[in-house]
Amino acid sequence: MTTAFDVPPDLLIERAAGVLKAGGKIAPPAWATYARTGVHTENAPRQPDWWFRRLAAVLRKAYDLGPIGTSRMASEFGGKRDDGSAPYHPRSGSRSIIRECLQQLETLGLVAKAEAKGRRVTPAGRKMLDDLAHQILIELAAKNPELTKYARPK
């Protein structure tokens, strides 16, 4: 059985972002066009579909590390702050972006609250990511024959 751990994360996030965007049930908030992704960034993201990529990345992080809360998730999306000549120090990502993403994923039924532990991926979310991972692995196996032993049909 193929899981989300068996494929490269960048391919899985791209595919999941496409599925979330094509679903049409969620839309970026109005403030998302102006928001920076954290205090460590100077500008807002330039990719027009960055919100759906962040949704997919948050879903994958919840799959990987869950149950996980917003603060710990924000530190996963953080980076180093450039304060000029001062040394670099790590900074967290935007918790409001993470919180909004998790709320939207909850409305889709892909993530659920875990009692006093944050949020975890629901069986529907796990199935979605595992099915996408299986599709990606089949495509990778077509390019690399050595992967065919892992990409068995369901």
Image (spheres, grey):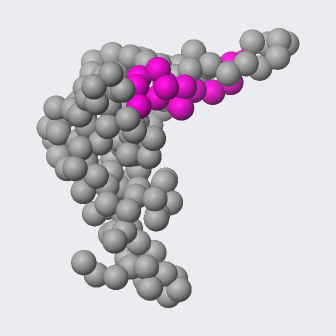
Can see residue 145?
yes
Eyeballing the image, is 109 above or below 80? below
- In this rendering, the answer to whether 151 lies above or below 88 is below
Measured as percent of width and height from the top left, residue 127 is found at: 24, 56
**Could you tell me which residue is drawn at 33 percent across and 51 percent down?**
16
Residue at x-position 43% and y-position 79%: 150
Residue 65 vertical placement versus 35 (above, below): below
The quadrant the N terminus occupies is bottom left
Q: Residue at x 62, y 19 (%)?
A: 91
Locate residue 36 relative to residue 135 in the image: left or right. Answer: right
Residue 72: image location, x then y, percent:
49, 26
Q: Is residue 76 magenta?
A: yes
Residue furthest right in the image: 85
- Residue 10 vs 57, above or below: the answer is below
Taking the image as shown, residue 144 lies to the left or right of residue 108, namely right
Please count the marks in the image.
Answer: 0
Foreground of the two, 36 or 153: 153
| Residue displayed at 54% across by 32% down | 76
Q: Quadrant of residue 90?
A: top right
Percent of width and height locating residue 34: 41, 17
Q: Is residue 61 magenta?
A: no
**Residue 92 in the image: x percent, y percent?**
56, 20
Q: Name the quadrant containing residue 129.
A: bottom left
In the picture, measured across the screen, residue 30 lies left or right of residue 56, that is: left
Q: Could one spot residue 57 in this view of the protein?
A: no
The region drawn magenta spans 68-82
Point out the image quarter for the C terminus.
bottom left
